Amino acid sequence: MKTTSAIVDRLEANPATYALPAWVYSHPEMARLELERVLRPSWQLVTHISALKKTGDFATLDLGPDAAFVIRDRDGTIRGFHNVCRHRGARLLDGSGSCPVSLTCPYHGWSYRHDGTLTGVPLRESFPDLDRAAHSLRPVKVDIAFGFVFVALAGSPPPVAQTWGVLGEELAPYRFEEMEFLGPITVEHWNVDWKIAMDNYLESYHVPIGHPSLYRLLKPDFEDQRAVPGVARGVGWIREQPSSRWSERLYQKLVGTISQHLPEANRKCWRGYSMLPNLGIDISPDQIDFFQVMPGGAGKTIIRSGVLGLPDTRREMRIARYLTNRINRQTNQEDILLCERVQRGLQSSSYVPGRLSTLERWMGEFHDLLRERIPEVRLPRAPERFV
């Protein structure tokens, strides 16, 4: 008990060197505050520009109880709106697709132009004095960076490219803007708090133990990390020693020869970038993937992800991408199990926050963001009342 008390005292004196208290990962009030103060005022990736090529092409995004969509207007502009009809609040669109003429609510048939203007109201005479101009769709902020389309449901975050700063320059050789989806956006449900999943992505300290296949393929990125406020990067270099596993060995042999469009150094590494609060982008020489860590309710996480690459029909590229996805699927399953172990462990009455390694500093930056936006997170125990 004396040891536990001493750790709690140090936590209160210098919280940034310790993990967050366990209650933060399970308290029901945290979900509301995180959406309100952290997630809604941040840029959220919706899709890639390749999915919005024609007038009326759209893609949707759900964030907790909120929903938004982006759509290409007739003048070529990509616009964003809350995905809610102005009549009775019905959801307008699902998934992705195209509305080449107009958007029509599936409930009562109210219709809107691509710029959000209300144009059609069935039985218009039953709405005396209806001001159609006052019932346009409510817009959301849109930003396009590195070929991706982002929305912010609240606040005025700085432009995405500005946040990435010099790290954005590292993406240029991969030609993100020219890429296309290699499959549909997928959604997974994990039985963990979203912050546990994000903590896991933000540190590579667990890779040598938790991800054997990844460790056989890549040297840890411990010595090759870089960051600007809000964005961090790690680089894992492909090992020269052939792996003991055939799939990893074949990938090592192929990847340098099929990625001649990249500078030589970029052909030999995998890169991982994180943008707070909840986005990760992984880059290999053959393809990239993004994933968003979204709250899915108490103790639940929604992982929304997509895979993109430059158009390439070569057999060798198809094989390399198959092998990359094989490794990523294995890594993903390992992460699910690891995060579930943490979720269970944090429920123990014996747990007090542990020290963070210097290799977990980007996780610490995430925790600092939470402490800044939700000051109650600094407390070792949940308060009786939240501000």
Image: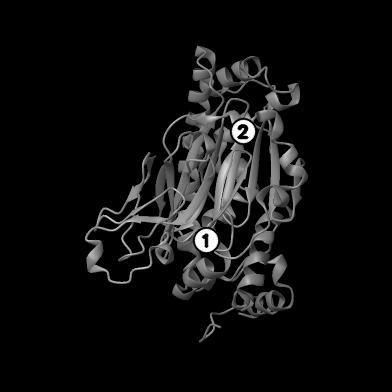
The quadrant of the image that shows the C terminus is bottom right
- Helix, strand or loop at label 1? It is loop
Q: Nearer the viewer, residue 287 or 379?
A: 287
The type of residue carrying mark 1 is Leu
Instruction: Relative to 253, say whether 61 is above or below.
Output: below
Q: Residues within 10 Å of mark 1 (few under 14, many from 20)?
A: many
The quadrant of the image that shows the N terminus is bottom right
Q: Which of 172 and 377 is in front in this view?
A: 172
Find residue 108 and report its horizontal and vertical position in percent: 24, 58
Instruction: Relative to 245, say whether 203 is above or below.
Output: below
Find residue 9 and report its horizontal and vertical position in percent: 69, 79
Find residue 367 and report its horizontal and vertical position in percent: 64, 64
Question: Can you see residue 348?
Answer: no
Number of the label disc, if any, that sits on residue 176: 2
Q: Residues within 10 Å of mark 2 (few under 14, many from 20)?
A: many
Q: Which of 131 and 353 is in front in this view?
A: 131
Task: Tell how many labels.
Answer: 2
- Helix, strand or loop at label 2? It is helix
Residue at 57% from the left image edge and 69% from the top image edge: 37
Residue 368 image-quadrant placement? bottom right
Residue at 72% from the left image edge and 50% from the top image edge: 162
Question: Can you see residue 283?
Answer: yes
Number of the label disc, if any, that sits on residue 153: 1
Find residue 75 and report its horizontal and vertical position in percent: 52, 41
Closer to the chain start, of discs 1 and 2, is 1
Residue 83 image-quadrant placement? bottom left
Instruction: Relative to 181, say whether 74 is above or below.
Output: below
Answer left or right for 379 relative to 302. right
The type of residue carrying mark 2 is Phe
Distance from disc 1 to disc 2, alpha carbons, whole Å, reads 25 Å
Number of the label disc, if any, that sits on residue 241: none
